[in-house]
Image (cartoon, rainbow, N blue to C red):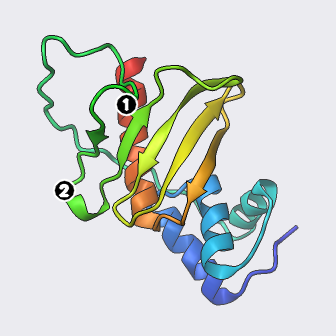
Amino acid sequence: MSAKVSKEQLDMVRRWASYGVDLNGIQKNLAAECGVHLTYMEVRFLLLDHDIEIARVQEKPAPEPVPAAAPEHETASSAPTEAPAADSAVNPVVTVDELQLPGTLISGKCRFPSGTNGAWQIDQMGRFGWTELNGTPTPVELQAFEMELRRILSRMG
């Protein structure tokens, strides 16, 4: 099974995958930038059919001073944490909700430099999703968001 996408769109998918954009991000980017609406499974099959692998993004460990009164984890009431990426033009501001939404393991908010903002959540099955997404973040912003979220989650664990 292979979804119908043009060669140009397939090249875009390859580029996003090389940046480390996950299946959900590729699915959203196809819809937003190409007008191609595929299910999560169709995107997965598309990548398999064309031998496209999502690159693992290597985070550079950055020394972070931790204040003595820092909480164990980020909360919506604490100051937003900025991603450690060098280019501040794509660093999203990611926060974790103090009170989690019903049915979620964790939820929070994100504000992207492009003006896009929204609420994110990870449900009890480990699935990631956006709610109240206002606009479309760029692939670079999505990658920076994913790196920041991974950093926050690793500090909580």
Q: Residue at x 53, y 66 (%)?
A: 136
Query: As rendered, which of 66 and 48 lies closer to the eye?
Result: 66
Q: Name which residue type carries label 2.
A: Ala
In x, y percent, where is residue 8? Answer: 61, 88
Q: Is residue 104 above or below residue 33?
A: above
How far separated are the C-alphas under marks 1 and 2?
A: 17 Å
Q: Quadrant of the N terminus?
A: bottom right
Find residue 108 and report its horizontal and vertical position in percent.
50, 35
| Marks 1 & 2, CB-CB < 8 Å contact | no
Residue sitting at x 45%, y 68%:
138
Residue picked out by circle 1: 152
Q: Residue at x 63, y 55 (%)?
A: 23
- Describe residue 78's horizontal placement relative to residue 133 as left or right: left
User: Picture coordinates of residue 26 (x, y %)?
Assistant: 61, 63
The answer to whether residue 132 is left or right of residue 147 is: right
Mark with earlier residue (1, 2): 2
Q: Is residue 116 left or right of residue 38?
A: left
Image spot of residue 116 (x, y percent): 46, 61
> From the image, which quarter does the C terminus lie in?
top left
At mark 2, the secondary structure is: loop
Secondary-structure class at tag 1: helix
- Where, by quadrant of the figure, is residue 60 drawn? top left
Q: Residue furthest front?
A: 77
Q: Amino acid at mark 1?
A: Ile
Find residue 34 and name its label. Answer: none
- The number of discs equals 2
In the picture, the disc for residue 86 is 2
Near-viewer residue (137 or 17): 137
